Amino acid sequence: MRADGPVAELIAELRSYQAELEAQNKVLQYSQAAAESASERFEALFSSVPLALMVLDEYDVVVQANAMAHRSFQPTEQDRPLNALMPFVCEGDTQRVHDAFGTARTQGHSEVTEVVFMIGDTGRITGDLHIACIEMAQEGADPVLQFLCAVIDQGPLLAQRQALQQGNEQLHASEKRLEAIINSALDAIICVDQHQRITVFNPTAAALFQCSASDALGSPLQRFVPDAAQALAFAQLTTQAMLGEMTALTASGKELAVEVSVSFERHAENVGGGETTTVFARDLTGRKKTEAHRNELEAQLRESQKMQAVGTMAGGIAHDFNNILHAILGNVELAMADCGPDSPVLESLLEIDKAGRRARDLVRQILTFSRNEPPQRTRVNLAEVAHDTERLLRVTLPPAIELHMHLSTGLPPLMADATQVEQALLNLCTNAIHAIGAARGSIHVEAARVRPDQRLCERLALAPMDYVALTVRDDGPGMDEALLARIFEPFFTTKPVGQGTGLGLAVVHGVMRTHKGAVDVHSAPGQGSRFTLYFPAAEDEAATPAPLPSPATPTPTTQPSAQRSHHVMYVDDDEALVFLVRRLLRRRGYQVSGFTDPHEATAALRAEPQRYDLLVTDYNMPGYSGIDLVREARRIRADLPVALASGYVTAEIEQAAMAEGASALIHKPNDVEELCATVQRLVAGHDAA
């Protein structure tokens, strides 16, 4: 039956409502299926995502945590269970985490970086904490707040960052060390780019090239090392190159001698590419000065050794020559005594005697040069010596040559032998006169008190003390280097044959050496010459030591007593001298026994020690010293007077002879009267004793 009316309308309305409910049920079913599917996907994502995820309620209770969170916060069963998050947060980060949760409540999300979570007793996790606030709706109640927390472990990144920071710090420290090395290097270090523009200019380079680093940077390398720029072509062949000695320029253009080496470095593309060249320049100025000073000292040493060798040779020659002269002069005097006053031979003998005496003076000059013993030095007034020398020079000074004396006032006295000082000054002035010759010129003699600097002391081998510098300079032709190297050699002269002996400057050199002084010479062709003598100045007014015993002064001879003829033993290796002395003393009434062999003389004295009244022996004899004979004679007979004769008597020989008991020293060659006077004095002294 079909309903009609109100019933029909009601049925239709019910059916429509039913269809609507069925449609809603289908939507609900679909929504439920979609929600369940989304929940499953969330659960799958929540559990499998490689992050530590946790859901916390408002009371920090862990509602849900994925496996990664459990593995991270509770790696072992003995560790604290993951029931709450805050107990894992280290004390220093607790406040930051609380503030982050507060921010998440108000803003819906927040983030805290580098939070340290303590795991167990020793473990820890350093990570970033990301928080999202979720509202869970409830029927008939306020929504419940939950927090979805994700912990992203930053440990590996932090370790890598720390390693990078350490690497950067080490790199920075290395750069600082490199900068310190470059800035403190003793060599000039210059870095240039591929365009040869200066990029590094260390302080040594700034001092060497006299240019500030700010001014040098950006300048071309050719500004300072012109020749080094050409060597940069070697960069394609090697990484290092030693360029050797070069000429560099300072900022003002002054030339410097430097030793240069270069180092080439190629850069990768990621650091800018191109090339960098480092130039190392070492200043050779000091080395050059040292080498020059060393060469100067070596030349001085060679000169000293040469002069010492020449002096030794001269002394040896003088010894033999003295014996010859002694024989000549003695025999001439005997011959003159045998000639009558009107004999035609007498004039010839006088000429022979005159020539012999000149030869004797020449030998004495040689000995002045060759002797090494100190002279008998006293306090000498240089002004008096200089003026005495001036008077001697004025007599023979050519009219075209002027002599000027410039002596400083208040000069200290010299500790010197006045005769040798006068001889040295006279020789220098005479040498200057000969150098000027017939031309017009002038000679200046100057003296001043000086204290030489260290370099001059080293060059001239002077002790550091006060000296009186006596300078003789002339405006003559001067000398070149070759001539300067030989001026002090004995017998070297530029004068014609027969006009000079070549001993003047050699004697000056010997005088200065024996006075512990020095002679300094400066000369150049066309600029004259300057000789400076450095005499040690006297220190105080203290009395000088007493001089050593000197040879006997001749006294008038007297004939020996007629009651007894004294017996003299004369020993010399030169037979001519023995023959001469035997004849000479026999004419004076003495008995003479002459020996050329000191061993035979010793044997004769030992056989008859009381037979002899005096022993005179030469010092230098082959294989035997006169000192040895003196010593042996004193052993045989202690009261026998003994005299030592030599043409080369040094202070050491004199002291040794006196120490052994020698009564006197005789310089050869001597006059006949001097020899006879010495013999008479010693014999008379022995008789009186």
Image: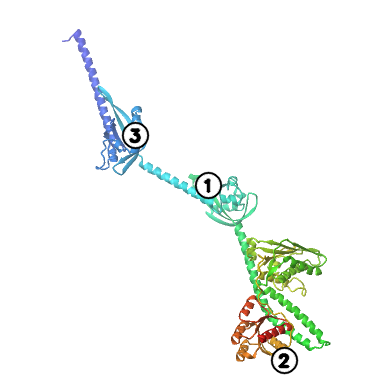
Tell me, for residue 97, which label it has, or none. Answer: 3
Mark 2, Cα crowd under 10 Å, few <14 / some 14-19 / many 20+, is: few
Q: Secondary structure at mark 1?
A: loop
Query: Which residue is identified by label 2?
Result: 562
Q: Secondary structure at mark 3?
A: helix
Nearest to viewer (mark 2 / mark 1): 2
Residue 27 at x, y = what percent?
Answer: 26, 22
Residue 228 or 329: which is nearer the viewer? 329
Nearest to viewer (mark 3 / mark 2): 2
Residue 91 at x, y = what percent?
Answer: 33, 38
Q: Is residue 375 above or below residue 29?
A: below
| The N terminus sits in image quarter | top left
Q: Is residue 573 visible?
A: no
User: Amino acid under label 3?
Assistant: Val
Residue 466 or 138: which is nearer the viewer? 466
> Image quarter for residue 521?
bottom right
Tell me, for residue 274, which label it has, or none. Answer: 1
Residue 541 at x, y = what percent?
Answer: 67, 66
* Residue lying furthest top: 5
> Image quarter for residue 256?
bottom right
